[in-house]
Image (spheres, rainbow, N blue to C red):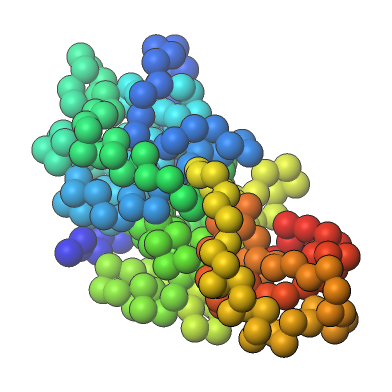
Amino acid sequence: MISPDLAGSKRRGAIPLNVPVEFAGYLWQGRVARGYWLTRDFHEWPGVQALTLKQTGLYFVCSIWAACHKTEVILPELVRMHGGAPGAPSCMVDVGLWEPCGRNYRSRTTQELRSGRRLPGQAIAVSSLLPQSLEGIRAGLAGLGVWALAASQSITMGIPGFIPEAVACEPACAAYADLLCAASLWLPGEGGYWMTKGDHPIEERWSGVRDDERAPIPDELRALVYERDEYRCVICGATADLTLDHIYPWSLGGPDTEENLRTLCRRHNSQKGARV
């Protein structure tokens, strides 16, 4: 069980950017829409599970920075800037996430953790602006650690960005739900919380993405949805040129499930596009 460890995040000056350009990190799968992909099994990684929430948040923000600069080298200045304790890097080394590299540290790419990021399917693209945002600073390292763990679980639960109460009430997360809401990173909703996208004029805080090819909807599922909707468009009642629509768009990570599918005529399906 990950133990709660509440702590704030403080910025302490600039970080030198003359680091080797040799990105082979495993937390992020690649640059997508000005962000990096957080995989759905991140919260199950053995190394991550061995960390406290504050350490998880530190690992999370350091990985964002490293991915942005296309390197796997973690600078001590980066750890200190985000409020990491002097012994924090040794914890990352002990659980196998980092290894010493001179005065710096290097993210380790073990096969065990690489297999997690190779899983195709839903993912979340996280903005590189999150750790430095006012909301991220208010949440602190522990709050950002919960944010990352819950985001990963939201993918597993089928709707990226929605944190069911069952997840939010877990001991590791429950103490931080109010904090994340106060920091405007979560928004209370029916049955759980929604991860907010922020109001940055250029870049969303996160977005749902997919890392696989779209497979055809099984004929049995297609027939089940059509029959449930009485072979009519649920908007206009048309009975011709029917299609299946993902209520939460497939391109944003929506699943192929009966609950997420509905019958629409082609016109209304085209008008909806990739909107929720």
Residue 245 placed where, x, y %? 70, 67
Q: Is residue 24 above or below residue 192?
A: above
Foreground pick, 162 / 63: 162
Foreground pick, 182 / 189: 189
Please give left or right for residue 251 compared with residue 149 in the image. Answer: right
Question: In which quadrant of the rendered image does the N terminus lie?
Answer: bottom left
Question: In which quadrant of the rendered image does the C terminus lie?
Answer: bottom right
**Which of the 4 quarters of the picture holds residue 172?**
bottom left
Residue 273, visible in the rendered structure: yes
Q: Residue at x 74, y 82 (%)?
A: 231
**Which of the 4 quarters of the picture holds residue 244?**
bottom right
Residue 218 placed where, x, y %? 54, 64
Please give left or right for residue 246 compared with residue 180 in the image. Answer: right
Q: Is residue 154 above or below residue 116?
A: below
Q: Residue at x 21, y 39 (%)?
A: 112
Foreground pick, 91 / 263: 263
